[in-house]
Image (spheres, coloured by chain):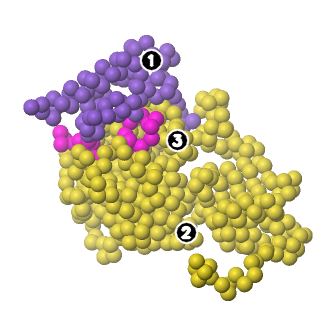
Chain colours: A purple, B yellow
Amino acid sequence: MESDEQRVAALAERIVERLGAGPASFYDLLGHFANAEYRDLLRAWGQVRERIALERDEHGNYLLPGSPAAAADGHPGSGGDGR
Amino acid sequence: MSITAVRKPDLRDQIRRLEELGELVRVRREVDARHVSGLLAQAKQALLFERVRGFDLPLVGGLAATRRRLALSLGATEEDAARRFQQAVERPIPPELVASGPVKEVKLLGDAVDLTRLPIPFLSEKDGAPYISSGIVVAKDPEYGSNAGCYRLMYRTPRQTSIDLVSPTDLRSFYQRRLARNEPLEIAVVIGAHAAEHVAASYRAPAGMDELALAGGLHGAPVPLVRCETVDLAVPADAEIVLEGEIAPIGWTADEGPFGDVTYLQCDLRWNPVFNVKAITMRRDAIFHATTMPLENIWLAALAVEASAWQALKVAGIDVRAITGTPGGLGFWKLIAAIRKREGEGKNALLALLPLSYVKWVVVTDDDIDIHDPDEVDWAITMRVQADRDVLVVPDARGKHLDPSVRAWELPRGQLPTTAKLGIDATIPDGIPPSMYERLRPAFREQVRLEDYL
């Protein structure tokens, strides 16, 4: 029987595969993994974020680093200057 | 340290009070945390989800989703909540350090720290990740003293969140000072505090004012504080959960957001620092508190603005009878005030209220108008306003970048936006006798009851 850790690690790999297929919001991931337990998703997401420096596009979607859809100008969104 | 003689109410007292008043309902059916936001959006009351699948903690939300519910939580009426707030500003009660409290019943340190023990909900469709939305962040600075404020935290990993420090706030300035020395800033995030602590933390207090003393003034009793385990800070001893840790000295470099915000809009992706969690302490049977957007954020902050509005009209010598905000007006971006008017005071009231920060538009009426009834206010504007005499537009006033109509993205970096403020004097125009506004009354209305005929 699959342990908790194995199940979460497998889910993390599936999240990475999904992001490899194209940009996705967290909401997209919740829908794509609708049958996964929410807490497992939090843990798996944490593993993904610890391992991979995810990028974001101008819509706020997550992307794997170096993917073609990543914003060409680096940091989309608002800066930290209090604006 | 002292033993506090008078115990101030905590979140559980607030929950109990709201349930007794029919303002909170318990959900006994097991719920998935991804559905909490959708259910709260449909609810007419606050909801306590007793069973959240996969978690040991129940979740409560919607506690401040209406002006009435927030007032009741503070032991006040809607009419006098703002005045109670002003009294607390004038007569704060400093917090007291105590030896221990319920928030110390469970201590998770080191490898035991795991944010996934908390049922952190996913709130809006476009949010970047699940959010801790009810956190009161406590911090201190050697020069400026202690500060408590409300900040959102986006879940990243079991020991890390992003924290939104984009807006100019005390916490941001504390962090900037540490960042200049390449040092982290210690913080503690309080989850599950009483509404009074939230109202106080939502207030932009003047320098030197302790928000937790303001909370004490609202309670009529000091907030008991306990020392944290891993950071040099003190937190409410009766809170449900406390996260202790540091904001890392990385500057505004980590992705945070998007987030469905107080404006009813999905605000954009931001770049912010991260919060590394070193310890979690909590009650043995802790309740996770989620603040839903936008309404709870609106009403928690509105009280302070209403209190300022009462003061502004008092300073202007105007006999104000009632002040309110509306959900559509984001609680405090629009104010409606009813006054007992003398000549010219409709305009004076506008001139007193429009300068208040965040206030974008104001309607002033006579005190025969029930300003809590939108139809009454509409009627007053329809029948008492001439647009070329009674509408005041103030261009180029200080604006907020949260308002898309100010087009903040077109501005040079670092420049703050301006806005045009609007005032509508819906009082009976000077020179028109009040008898012209005698209202019709259905004949014998008080002598018959419809229920007797149905």
Residue B209: assigned label: none
- In which quarter of the view is residue B125 placed? top left
Instruction: Count up the numbered dots.
Output: 3
Crowd class of label 3 (few under 14; some 14 to 19; many from 20; radius 10 Å): some
Q: Is residue B7 left or right of residue B220?
A: left
Amino acid, disc 1: Ala
Q: CA distance from mark 3 to mark 2?
A: 29 Å
Residue B78: assigned label: 2
Q: Is residue A79 left or right of residue B30?
A: right
Residue depth check, mark 3 versus mark 1: number of the one nearer the observer: 1
Residue depth check, mark 3 versus mark 2: number of the one nearer the observer: 2
Range shown magenta: B110-134
Amino acid, disc 3: Ser
* Labels 3 and 1 share a subunit: no
User: Is label 3 in contact with label 1 (beta carbons under 8 Å)?
Assistant: no
Report the residue marked by disc 3.
B167
- Label 3 SS: loop
- Label 1 SS: loop
Q: Which residue is found at the position 24% from the left and 62% from the top?
A: B102
- Determine the chain carrying the residue at label 1: A
